[in-house]
Image (cartoon, rainbow, N blue to C red):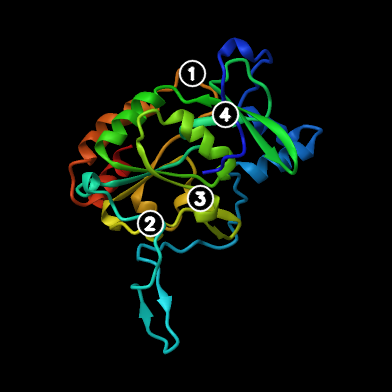
Amino acid sequence: MDSGPIITQVSKEEVNSPLQEKGVQNQSSSKKPRNRSIFQSLFCCLCHDNSEPIPVNNNAPLLVEENGSVTKATVKYLLPEIKPQDASKICVVIDLDETLVHSSFKPVNNADFIIPVEIDGVMHQVYVLKRPHVDEFLRRMGELFECVLFTASLAKYADPVADLLDKWGAFRARLFRESCVFHRGNYVKDLSRLGRDLTRIIIVDNSPASYVFHPDNAVPVASWFDNMADTELLDLLPFFERLSKVDDVYTVLKQHRTTS
C-alpha cells in the first residue's frame, strides 16, 4: 500500500469549478498535452493495437523447463491462498476506473474524494466521482463473493481511492498495473495468473481490452463518467445474486451474453 499521498475526503461545496463532460477525456484535444501525458502515466489508459487478433488463453500460466517440458507447479500466483470464509465463493475481479469511479485532474464541483498524488516530484489533485449505487454494490458483492480489485492504474492513485471507496472490506486483495500483462499496447488482466479455478472467476470491467485473454469470464459494464442517473451497478445485483450460487460460471455467463 502506497503511504505517500495524504487522503482527503471533501464535500461537494469544497470544489468550485464545474464538471466537464467525461472529465479528463476531453483533455486529449486541449492545448495542454502534458496533462494528457500525466493522465496516461497514472490511470489505466489503453493504447489499442488491432493489427492482428489477440489469442484467448483459458489455461493456467505455463512455464517451460530446460528439458522442454511444461510445468504449472512453480508458478507464483497473484493472489494469496483463499481464506476459509471465502473457500466456497466465486472470485470476482472488479475494475476501478470508469467501472466504479471516474477520476480527473480537472476540478469538479461535486467530487466525492480528492486524492493528492505526487508525479515527477509535483503534487497533483485527483478529483474522484463515485458511480451511483457503488456503495450498495460493493457491500453486497463483498458478502456474495471473494472480491478482488484489479486495475491498470498505479497503486499510488488507486490504493487511496480504494481505501475511501471500500467501507466494508469487500476487496480481499488489490492488484495494480504491475500485475497486468502489457500485451500489444494494452494492460491485460490475465485471470489465469490469479491462482483460482477459471470456472469460478468473473471479471467486471468496462474495457474489453482488459479481459481479451478470458472473454468468457467477463460481465461487461458500460463506461461511466458523470451520469448521476446511471443504475447499472444496481441493476446487476439480482444477476450476481443468482450467479453466486452456481458451480461453473461459463454456462450462465454465456446465457447472459446472448440475452443482454
Q: Is residue 52 left or right of residue 91?
A: right
Callout in the foreground (4, 1): 4
Give the label, 4 or 3, closer to the camera: 4
Question: Where residue 205 sits in the image (x, y, percent)?
Answer: 44, 42
Estimate the spatial distance between the alpha carbons at disc 3 and disc 1, rounded to whole Å: 26 Å
| Circle 2 Cα neighbour tier, 10 Å, few/some/many (<14 / 14–19 / ≥20) | many
Residue at which label 3 appears: 209
State the residue at coordinates (38%, 25%): 135
Q: Earlier in the sequence, mark 3 or mark 1?
A: 3
Q: Answer above or below: position of 68 versus 225.
A: below
Outermost residue to the bottom: 67
Between the residue at mark 4 and the residue at mark 1, the CA separation in whole angstroms equals 24 Å
Residue 241 left/right relative to 99:
left
For the residues labelled 4 and 3, say whether their Cβ atoms are less than 8 Å apart. no
User: Helix, strand or loop at disc 1?
Assistant: loop
Q: Which residue, given by chain and number where applicable, does mark 1 sit on?
A: 228
Question: Sequence-wise, which precedes: disc 1 or disc 2?
Answer: 2
Q: Are marks 3 and 1 in contact (CB under 8 Å)?
A: no
Distance (Cα) linking label 4 and label 3: 30 Å
Which numbered dot is residue 7? Answer: 4
Callout 3 secondary element: helix
Is 191 rendered above or below residue 95?
A: below
- Give amino acid for label 1: Met
Residue positioned most to the top: 13
Q: CA distance from mark 3 to mark 2?
A: 18 Å
Q: Residue at x 20, y 37 (%)?
A: 242
